[in-house]
Amino acid sequence: MTRHTFIGGLLLAASAAASASVTSPVIGKLLWSEEFNGASLNTSVWSASNGNGCQINLCGYGNQELQFYSPGNLSIADVPFEPGTRALAITARREVNGANQFTSGKVDSSGKVQVKYGLVEVRMATPKVGVGLWPAAWMLGVSPQVWPRNGEIDIMEMGGRQPAGLPPISPDQFVGSNVITFQQAACVPGNESCAASTAWQNKNWYTPSRSLANRFVTYRLYWTDTQMRFTVLDNGREYDMYKAPITVNSTALNQPFYLLLNMAVGGNFTPAATPAQVTAPLPATTYVDYVRVYELDGLGEVKLGVGTQPEVGKFGVFTDNTPVDNKQVPGVSADVFIWNQGSMTAGDLPPYEGTGVLAFKYFAPGQWFGGSIQSRQVHDMSGFRNGHIKLKIKAPANVAFRIGIYDTYTNQSSVTFPANTTAYGLVRDGEWGTATIPVAEIAGPKVALQSMLDLFQFFSVDGALPGQQFQIAFDDIVWDSGSASVPRVAVAPAIAKTAAISGSTTQTGATTLEFAAPASGWVDVHYTVNGGEAQTVRMRQEGGTGRYTAGGLKKGDVVEYRFTAWDAARQLAVDSAPRTAVIR
């Protein structure tokens, strides 16, 4: 589902040569599925939207949509036109909710289920979309970066304007797919978001001979590390959306994505910009029978929860030669930003070590400045609170600046390097020097180290803006936990201490197990099923208790688990002893 209006050339072009992995796919085991057969929506998998976008400072969800999403428009119901089938029912209604004249439903799996590669299959039936309805099954990258840098994959969407030159056809006989990423070449006037679409001036649709209204078809995404293919399985035959597979040439598309299912009303994608232009018959319901993810040519991952493994030992934010346990690479796993290009540009100071350097030239005296290294994926740095950030800095002695960090919840904190002063070990002589900043001090009480976006920021000090031009450079930026390095497969923060955390499990169904633990702050559960891959999940808070329900289990499964909780009084993370539960 397109998040904003955009223009620009075809920057993720259709592949000229077909790849066997998506055109002659080898489908493996079922990795995960949601069958929507229960009595109600499974909230351990899905979150229901409640609002019109204004609650997240994105009124109309960036598309001038006309609906208010309400959990009351979602249900698990029997499908009236296919006896014996239960499905997720998403119903749009013409009813007033605040300033909105329509309501509808939307669910997403953000923070609960994430997918990377494989065959993603959605069986769904749409209503008569007419003019104004916009049902969609789509995915967004779990990256904390803003759209379109996180990437968007539209498996199917209906109700949009049809391309010029296509013979007149009912909107119920037209369905399309799309992929959107950030591309520098798309940064043109009118497209300030730099969104690049595979659908721009490219065939990306399926036009069946009969209406899609109130009948099931299956939409498929074949996704590997090099290509994507979108198809529709209709009455036993498979049809391609695009003329050829799409080449994956953005690192955003090699990262995990979460799932979204919804039906918007009106907006930029549709011909209905105002309530009066919506002529689709209402109420109307989209049914989703299931969502399944299969292994494709040996590729495919489904992770439950936030899927973020805590960093340990030493983490390189920007470094070439310093030994670290893990690190970011600008242009691959992180991006460098200059916040105010009216005062600062790239500099030419040589690096302290290696071949890379963060060098900047300040050219507008009296103006503010700033920049950052932004991670493309969330980093859990909770094991570094008792450690420090060590970096090299080259700056004039008479320039004051701040070094800061920023989490995914928009919390920012920083420390100050005053002019003509030695701070955090940095001698201000204009040459390369070393600064060592305690993480506990720079993070303060608000920054969520378990969910970090910017692991390094620098910016001017209000009231002490430079009065002259200068250059400043940073290099060899490393977070050090202060603990010995441990293998990356570890699932506990490096600072975790064993303590008597009381916690429990309750089998809540034939395939579900609920974890519960007291929680005055954040609490994670770490678990494995039959000795498989370890999962780490941030538990939801409910009245002083952290809870999480794991699904997809079966009788005889052995679940090994333990909890990690934040002890605010001692300012460290503590672990419970490992325990075991067996599914009965």
Image (tube, grey):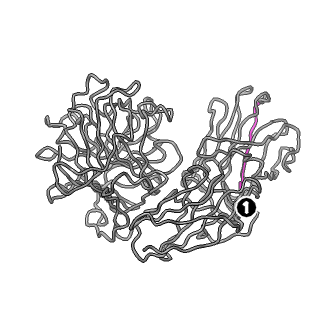
Spot occupied by residue 355 in the image (x, y as percentages of width and height): 66, 56
Q: Is residue 279 above or below residue 429?
A: above
Give me the residue at 26% from left, 63% from top. Answer: 23
Q: Tell me the quarter of the picture where residue 116 sits.
A: bottom left
Spot occupied by residue 338 in the image (x, y as percentages of width and height): 62, 38
Q: Dot 1: few (<14), some (14–19), or many (≥20) neighbours within 10 Å? A: many
Q: Tell me the quarter of the picture where residue 363 sits.
A: top right
Locate residue 166 relative to residue 111 in the image: left or right. Answer: left
Q: Is residue 278 above or below residue 441?
A: above
Identify the magenta region: 468-477
Spot occupied by residue 492 in the image (x, y as percentages of width and height): 63, 66
The residue that disc 1 covers is: 481
Give me the residue at 53% from left, 45% from top. Answer: 145
Spot occupied by residue 204 in the image (x, y as percentages of width and height): 26, 46
Locate residue 208 relative to residue 300 in the image: left or right. Answer: left
Q: How would you classify the magenta stretch by its main secondary structure?
A: strand
In this orientation, does residue 390 appear?
no
